[in-house]
Amino acid sequence: MLQDKVALVTGSTSGIGLAVAEAFAASGCHLMLNGFGDSDDIEKLRQRLASTYAIKVCYSAADVSSPDEIAGMLHDAQEQLGGIDILVNNAGVQHVAPVTEFPQAQWDRIIAINLSSAFHTIQGALPGMLKKGWGRIINVASIHGFVASPYKSAYVAAKHGVLGLTKTVALEVAKSGVTCNAICPGYVMTPLVQNQLADTARARGITEQQVMDEVLLGTQPTGRFTDATDIAAMAVFLCGPASGNVTGSVQVMDGGYSAG
Ligand code: NAD
């Protein structure tokens, strides 16, 4: 369906980004992977995707909190893959603490990775898309793009910002053939969620099991996590033939979290 398009997925060495990258690979896209991890594991992943789907797969170790490293990654994508048709801003981190104790360095890091990186990748990739008259930008935001949870000030602020950026870009390029949309998952069981269980338990004075049952699953009326592969399927839909007039939208996949 997306044969020979080029997709860059930030934070695609783990969790949702990895599922999105694999779904694009299965649709025939060439890939630029990005994210951290063990270099041997990442190379094995790169080779597996390339051979399974008969596509070109490159990898950039760019830290997306650095505008210079993002520029380098976009340059590499141009040189190695001929530019980017599909940009998925997915890389994200979390820190859980009361606002009065929230470390300034964590605030700066989360805003840089979860929000400013999307501005820098869009600014770098959009001119090439406009030139081709086709492009797809997908920002992986969160249900925390429009509802808050205590102890996640930086994350919630960043995700609210991502929705604002998404809508603004969509309006600026509305007639160009380039769309810009956001996906807002509820909780998905990935390392990002796994790693916040202990801090959330500490901040709320409850056990990790209570965090799982009450804070995570308790907020989702369906009582289950969203699957990363379902988010990936939504990302593919947003790049497919039926999505040409879908722009500036927020695709909520939260098990009913925000309906209540
Ligand atoms: P994850 O921890 O499994 O993956 C995060 C990815 O981002 C990894 O590949 C990691 O290496 C990469 N990354 C982190 N910092 C980076 C940096 N500075 N530069 C480049 N890459 C970096 O997490 P996930 O749950 O798959 O999260 C992916 C996105 O989905 C995030 O934006 C997150 O906010 C969002 N999200 C997750 C959930 C959830 O419940 N898991 C819910 C809503 C939204």
Image: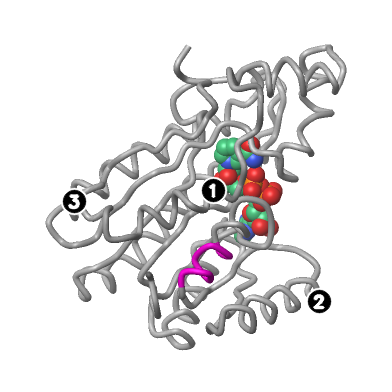
Q: Nearer the viewer, residue 246 or 111?
A: 246
Provide residue 78's location: percent of width, then percent of height: 41, 82
Q: Residue at 48% of width from left, 40% of height from top? A: 141
Q: Residue at 69% of width from left, 34% of height from top? A: 95
- The residue at which mark 2 appears reads as 40
Q: Earlier in the sequence, mark 2 or mark 3?
A: 2
Q: Is residue 5 left or right of residue 63?
A: left
Q: In this rendering, is residue 22 above or below 150? A: below
Q: Nearer the viewer, residue 68 or 90?
A: 90
- The image quarter containing residue 126 is bottom left
Q: Can you tell which of label 2 and label 3 is closer to the viewer? A: 2
Q: Give the residues drawn in magenta, as a range.
A: 21-27
Q: Nearer the viewer, residue 103 or 97?
A: 97
- How far apart are the alpha carbons under marks 1 and 2? 27 Å
For residue 112, the mark is 1
Within-10-Å neighbours for mark 2: few <14, some 14–19, many 20+: few
Residue 201 visible in this rendered orientation of the protein: yes
Q: Is residue 251 left or right of residue 10?
A: left
Going by the numbered disc 1, the residue's amino acid type is Ala
Confirm whether the magenta stretch covers residue 52.
no
Most extreme residue toward the bottom is 79
- The residue at which mark 3 appears reads as 172
Going by the numbered disc 2, the residue's amino acid type is Asp
Q: Residue at 69% of width from left, 78% of height from top? A: 48
Residue 108 visible in this rendered orientation of the protein: no
Where the N terminus falls, by quadrant? bottom left
Q: Residue at 84% of width from left, 13% of height from top? A: 206
- How far apart are the alpha carbons under marks 3 and 1? 23 Å
Under circle 1, the secondary element is helix
Under circle 3, the secondary element is helix
